[in-house]
Amino acid sequence: MDTPTPHTPQPDEPDLDALEAAEEAAEVEGFDAWRAQQQARRAGGRSTTVFGRVVTLPSSMPLGLSISMDNLSGSSDIKDVRKVVGALFGKGALDHWIASGVDLFEFEVLMAWGVASANGQHITFERAAELVKEAEARKAARGKARQGKKKARRKR
């Protein structure tokens, strides 16, 4: 009776035993263990210097920040703005920016860059500025469209 010889994977062929072992090692029990594993993989978000301070953004968008941003759109309360900016750029960031002379456009660029970065998008500040300008153009176009509708109604 012939004894079968074990199959040796070729260099261009995947090692199925090693792949299976890696999959088993990647499996974790329970949500908390899985979350810890995911956070370790994402360890640390993007860092940059803003008005002389090094800031590190979260490596993913915190749910609380997302909810706060939704509520912020209708608010002019500085506490709400501080909370959102702080969640992305750290406590005291907004006050530091204001003391450093941030203007509205710069603020919008920082926020666009920060939100994109926390969502895993690696954009430049220049691209963030383009996105802000595009959003402003859309907003202006909507405003003109509304004015046109009002004029049309008055002519009737």
Image (spheres, rainbow, N blue to C red):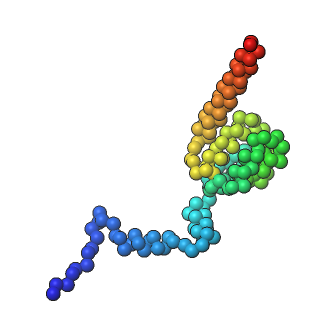
Quadrant (top left, top right, bottom left, bottom right) of the N terminus: bottom left
Q: Residue furthest top?
A: 155
- From what the image shows, is residue 123 above or below residue 57? above
Q: Residue at x 74, y 12 (%)?
A: 155
Tell me where residue 112 sits by quadrant.
top right
Q: Residue furthest front?
A: 156
Relative image position of residue 78 (x, y in whole percent) = 83, 44
Q: Residue furthest left?
A: 1
Relative image position of residue 136 (x, y in whole percent) = 67, 31
Q: Nearer the viewer, residue 123 or 29?
A: 29
> In the rendered image, is residue 85 in sight?
no
Q: Residue at x 45, y 70 (%)?
A: 23
Relative image position of residue 114 (x, y in whole percent) = 66, 47
Side of 115 relative to 92 (left or right): left
- From what the image shows, is residue 64 above or below residue 116? below
Tell me where residue 105 sits by quadrant.
top right
Quadrant (top left, top right, bottom left, bottom right) of the C terminus: top right
Relative image position of residue 57 (x, y in whole percent) = 66, 53
- From what the image shows, is residue 118 above or below residue 25? above
> In the rendered image, is residue 112 in sight?
yes
Q: Nearer the viewer, residue 114 or 147?
A: 147
- From what the image shows, is residue 120 above or below residue 75? below
Q: Nearer the viewer, residue 129 or 63?
A: 63
Q: Residue at x 76, y 46 (%)?
A: 71
Q: Residue at x 83, y 48 (%)?
A: 79
Q: Nearer the viewer, residue 47 or 16?
A: 16
Give the number of callouts: 0
